[in-house]
Amino acid sequence: VKNQNVRDKIHRRSSARIQLEREALYSPAMRDLNTANAVLVYIDFLSRRRFEKTKSSRKSKAKWKFVNNGEIVYTYAEAEDLGMSQSTFNRAIDSLIYHGFIDIEESGVALYKCATKYRISEGWRQWGTPSFIKRPRP
């Protein structure tokens, strides 16, 4: 129950939905993720997205734009608060980067309390094909 309370505090008990594309769910990259923790961390990343409604003409539907990609922060301390060890969190991040689900936009420096900033990537769509570009962890 403690972990659930921490999770609620982090996500502010929002009733907002988390959108996971069916294509991503059934992709070879998702099916190859080596741990359930990697999937949980990916879902946590998706829950940290912020969307804003874009202006549209009267006749068209309003569209939503993902506005904080490249600015998503998920710290080791937050992962520990959710019951995940640093090594488990590190392996989950490595797996998500390897499979093209996230990229590191800006590497943080723990000594100076600068958090790493992440970008949610679409690279998983090409994972396992010759066109997939491997992005090493900085």
Image: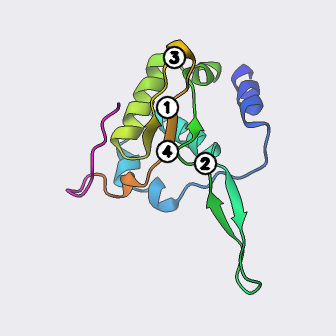
Q: Which three-letter amino acid code belongs to the residue tagged 1?
A: Asn
Classify 36 as above or below 129.
above
Total of numbered circles in the picture?
Answer: 4
> Mark 2 — residue?
68
Q: Which three-letter amino acid code belongs to the residue tagged 4?
A: Arg
Q: Indicate the secondary structure of the residue bearing disc 1.
A: helix
Locate residue 10, reporting x and y percent.
Answer: 72, 31
Q: Tell me the quadrant of the picture where the C terminus can be found.
A: top left
> Mark 3 — residue?
110
Q: Is residue 116 left or right of residue 19?
A: left
First in residue order: circle 3 vs circle 1: 1
> Mark 1 — residue?
37
> Which residue is at 74% across, 87% downward?
59
Residue 55 magenta-drawn? no
Q: Indicate the secondary structure of the residue bearing disc 4.
A: strand
Residue found at the far top of this picture: 111
Foreground label between 3 and 1: 3
